[in-house]
Image (cartoon, rainbow, N blue to C red):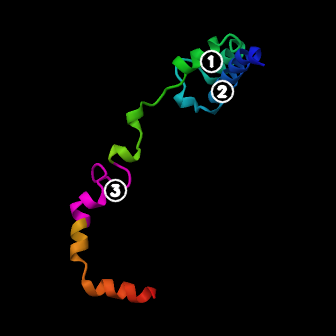
């Protein structure tokens, strides 16, 4: 069974590269048209030259810092800078202090 592992790995990379070429929008492909990349991956996939060429030069990759994830300062708090824990957020702590005691009693009375 172990002697088939290299063949299966090459086949998996070949299939992954082929599907990646097909699913990539035309505007994100560099250097050659999409049809040419499909042909290159199919013709040279058996020796991994096509898939490696596609992964290295074909697709315009995004850098990790370019995303809009929660750590980029735009996620979860309306673009007000980096995320701050509630117990460190002065605005949140001020809103707790401003809350009236009778409002708390009304909330507890409605539950029961």
Q: Is residue 79 above or below residue 26?
A: below
Gap in angstroms between the C-alphas marked 2 and 3 = 37 Å
Gap in angstroms between the C-alphas marked 1 and 3 = 41 Å
Q: Quadrant of residue 13?
A: top right
Circle 1 residues within 10 Å: few <14, some 14–19, many ≥20: many
The magenta region covers 74-92
Nearer-N-terminus badge (2/1): 2
Q: Give the labeled residue for mark 3.
A: 78
Nearer-N-terminus badge (2/3): 2
Gap in angstroms between the C-alphas marked 2 and 1 = 8 Å
Q: Is residue 84 magenta?
A: yes
Q: Is residue 11 above or below residue 91?
A: above
Instruction: Specify whether 106 is left or right of 41.
Output: left
Q: Is residue 90 magenta?
A: yes
Instruction: Specify whether 72 is left or right of 36.
Output: left
Q: Which quadrant: the N terminus?
A: top right
Q: The residue tagged with tag 3: helix, strand or loop?
A: loop
Give me the disc on residue 16. Answer: 2
The residue that appears at 24% across and 59% down in the rendered structure is 89
Instruction: Specify whether 4 is left or right of 84.
Output: right
Closer to the camera in the image, 22 or 47? 47
Residue sitting at the far right: 1
Q: Main secondary structure of the magenta part?
A: loop
Q: The residue tagged with tag 2: helix, strand or loop?
A: helix
Q: Give the labeled residue for mark 1.
A: 51
Circle 2 residues within 10 Å: few <14, some 14–19, many ≥20: few
- CB within 8 Å, label 2 to label 3: no
- CB within 8 Å, label 2 to label 1: yes
> How far from the left and from the top, in percent, is residue 105?
33, 87
Circle 3 residues within 10 Å: few <14, some 14–19, many ≥20: few
Image depth: mark 2 or mark 3 in front: 2
């Amino acid at each position: 069974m172990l002697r088939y592992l290299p063949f299966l790995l090459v086949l998996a990379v070949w299939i992954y590269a082929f599907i990646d070429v097909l699913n990539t929008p035309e505007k994100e492909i560099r250097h050659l048209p999409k049809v040419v990349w499909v042909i290159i991956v199919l013709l040279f996939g058996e020796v991994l030259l096509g898939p490696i060429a596609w992964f290295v030069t074909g697709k315009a990759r995004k850098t990790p810092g370019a995303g809009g994830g929660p750590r980029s300062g735009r996620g979860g708090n309306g673009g007000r800078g980096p995320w701050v824990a509630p117990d460190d957020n002065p605005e949140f702590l001020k809103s707790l202090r401003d809350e009236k005691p009778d409002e708390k009693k009304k909330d507890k009375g409605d539950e029961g």
